[in-house]
Image (tube, rainbow, N blue to C red):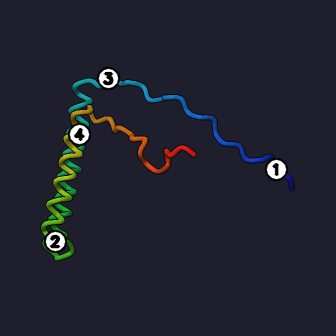
Amino acid sequence: MLSAPAQAAPPKENSEKKVELTEKQLNELSVLHKEVLEKNKQIINKQIEYGLMKEEKGKVIISMMERRFKELEENGFAYKHSRHHHHYRDR
């Protein structure tokens, strides 16, 4: 059975549009992200309590999660994708 040669997908144009969220939408996202942050902190603290993780490492992880939340909040809860990830490398 013969098949056509594989072709690479055409390059995507910058399809990300600038979206303006309402205050209500921003508040909803803020509440959800804060809930997730607090749950993740609880998980880290339990792992420390149960001896699965050292306290120093837990503090570093929590600090990183808080920094990420602050960045998200500053960017209107829009994820910013970086071209530095391995799957964006030029070939």
Q: Earlier in the sequence, mark 1 or mark 4?
A: 1
Within 10 angstroms of label 1, few (less than 14), some, or many (20 or more) residues? few
Q: Check disc 3 and give the amino acid type.
A: Glu
Select label 4 or label 3 by which is in front. 4
Q: CA distance from mark 4 to mark 3?
A: 17 Å
Q: CA distance from mark 3 to mark 1?
A: 45 Å
Q: Which residue is mark 3?
A: 20
Q: CA distance from mark 1 to mark 4?
A: 47 Å
Q: Give residue 71's mark.
A: 4
Q: Give residue 54's mark.
A: 2
Q: CA distance from mark 1 to mark 2?
A: 55 Å
Horizontal and vertical percent for residue 26? 24, 31
Q: Earlier in the sequence, mark 3 or mark 1?
A: 1
Q: Earlier in the sequence, mark 2 or mark 3?
A: 3
Q: Earlier in the sequence, mark 1 or mark 2?
A: 1
Q: Check disc 1 and give the amino acid type.
A: Ser
- Mark 1 vs 2: CB contact within 8 A: no
- Quadrant of res 40: bottom left
Q: Earlier in the sequence, mark 2 or mark 4?
A: 2
Within 10 angstroms of label 3, few (less than 14), some, or many (20 or more) residues? few
Q: Which residue is mark 1?
A: 3
Horizontal and vertical percent for residue 61? 20, 58
